[in-house]
Image: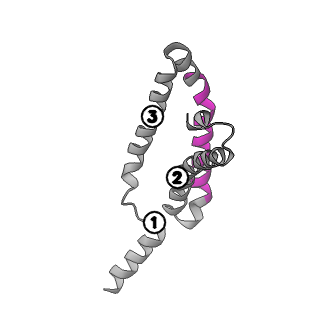
Amino acid sequence: AAFAATPASMGAMQWFTVFMIGFFLYGPQMMIGLCGAELVRPDSVGASQGFLGWVAYLGAANAGIPLAMIVQNLGWGAYFSTLMGACAIACMLMVPMINASSYNQKLAEKAAAGGA
């Protein structure tokens, strides 16, 4: 909506809008990959990244038809409400990882407990 509302004569504002869209899309995507790499042992990083990539591709492949049906049958308001609901569900699924320790933090905790 912000990009469509920006006049064509305001090149700097269009550039800033595209920058912000990319920033807010790439940030969460990068954080999910980072969580997948940090929460597993070093020899399991490739498997965890592969699994996360598989889930992402599966979601992207299956998002087109249901979302198109929502737009066609219920309109754009329902489409954006569905996306917001999906984001809320994704955030709730990430809540258990709030206090999760990385592999290196677990090693440091074991070393501190064993040395005390």
- All told, the count of numbered labels is 3
* Disc on the earlier residue, 1 or 2: 2
Query: Given the image, on which type of amino acid does mark 2 rest?
Result: Ile
Query: Where does label 2 land, which residue?
Result: 32
Q: Which secondary structure dominates the residues rendered in magenta?
A: helix
Distance (Cα) linking label 3 and label 2: 18 Å
Q: Residue 58, image x and y in percent?
A: 60, 36
Q: Residue at x 41, y 38 (%)?
A: 89
Residue 4 on image: x %, y %: 61, 33
Along the viewing direction, whichever of 115 and 12 lies nearer the viewer: 12
* Quadrant in which the N terminus appears: top right
Question: Toward which corner of the image does residue 110 lie, by quadrant?
Answer: bottom left
Residue bearing the label numbered 3: 84
Determine whether the residue tagged by mark 1 lies in a helix, strand or loop: loop
| Res. 102 mark | 1
Q: Residue at x 43, y 71 (%)?
A: 105
Question: N-terminal of the two: label 1 or label 3?
Answer: 3
Q: Which mark is residue 78?
A: none
SS of the residue under disc 2: helix
Question: Is 61 within the magenta?
Answer: yes
Mark 3, mark 2: which one is toward the viewer? 3
Q: From the viewer's perspective, is the residue at label 1 or at label 3 nearer?
A: 3
Residue 13 as seen in the image, left or right of residue 100? right
Left or right: residue 105 compared with residue 7: left
The residue closer to the viewer here, 30 or 107, is: 30
Which amino acid, mark 3?
Answer: Met
Task: Say if 68 sits above or below 61 in the image.
Answer: above
- 107 vs 62, left or right, is left
